[in-house]
Image (tube, grey):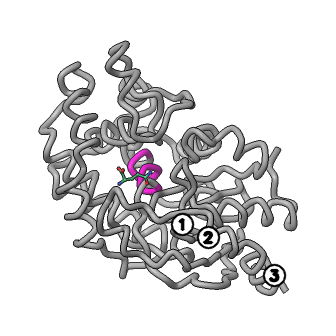
Amino acid sequence: MLEKKLENIIKKNRHLIKEGHVADYIPALSKVDPNYIGISISDIDGNIYKAGDYNTKFTIQSISKIIGLMLALKDNGEDYYFSKVGCEPTDEPFNTLYKMDLKNQKPANPMINSGAIITTSLIKGNKEEKFNRIIEFIRLIAENPGITYNEEVYLSEKYTGDKNRAIAYLMKSKGLLEGEVEDILDTYFKQCSIEVTAVDLAKIGLFIARRCPLDLEGRIENERMAAIVTAIMTTCGMYDFSGQYAATVGIPSKSGVGGGILATIPNKLGIGVFSPALDKFGNSIAGYGIMKDLSRELNLNIF
Ligand code: GLN
């Protein structure tokens, strides 16, 4: 029943793919077939529903920012963490460095690249330890020990990621970022190249929806961490489209330029969507259409 509905939603939104483009500023991503489209939903009891290319792997990209945020909150506690990264939405694109340069301002929020790079720097450990903790955490909460990263995408971004390099060195020059810049960037690029499926994203969404029910050590309670992550996904998760997305979809979500969208509905559902053609904000164009329909047809708007 639900899977039939998901198939119909895919059918209805497939035409949007033509209006988008796969990310090509990371050269390896330009090779991805734009025609993939898949959904998975995981309900509070752990039942999984899926349709389309739910089993196709893609790179997690910016969706890793919520994983980094959870670890950095655990390692540092919320007061220290938010002394380094802001908690406000921005109408600037995800790879902006404009305000930091103009006003020496800390990054607006953890969902834009500047905030995410600082977040990665705040995760405890050297560069190998940081990355291992990130990927192990993803494996744990996606309940998928087979998750790995895509070496080609990682190296492609590492060799061409000059904008992120500029952001990181600018932050270092202003005293906003501490540590070895190239090491931090290396971990950031690698965390973005971790490969997941729509089912993995739905399970991560469910973990947050269930208020992070694991015995996780750290300086913040799981419930509180889930509340912060969900709030920041709502206000900042879709970049400079987050307001319109909240008004039209009304589900806390985070997108990545690999074409994924992870969504979470507190105490109810986790959702993973994948379709790699993007709109001008860097969000999956068919993914947005799918989320709008899911919200309407399943009555999921939290507002
Ligand atoms: N790795 C990408 C970058 O830093 C992630 C961006 C994204 O998914 N929006 O540019």
Report the amino acid beneath label 2.
Ile
Residue that label 1 marks? 277
Q: Position of residue 132 (x, y in %)?
A: 25, 62
Q: CA distance from mark 2 to mark 1?
A: 6 Å
Q: Is residue 250 above or below residue 34?
A: above
Cβ(mark 3) to ligand 1 < 8 Å?
A: no
Comes first in the chain, label 3 or label 1? 3
Q: Marks 3 and 2: in contact by CB < 8 Å?
A: no
Secondary structure of the residue carrying tag 3 is: helix
Say which amino acid is labelled 3.
Leu
Magenta residues span 63-69
- Pick the quarter of the image with the N terminus: bottom right
In-front residue for pair 96/41: 96
Residue 17, label in figure: 2
Q: For the residues labelled 3 and 1, say whether their Cβ atoms are less than 8 Å apart.
A: no
Discs 2, 1 touching: Cβ within 8 Å: yes
- Quadrant of residue 114 in the image? top left
Percent from the top left, x then y, of residue 43? 71, 71
Magenta: predominant secondary structure element?
helix
Asked if the magenta segment contains residue 113, the reply would be no
**Residue at 67% of width from left, 82% of height from top?**
50
Name the residue rendered at 67%, 68% in the picture: 16
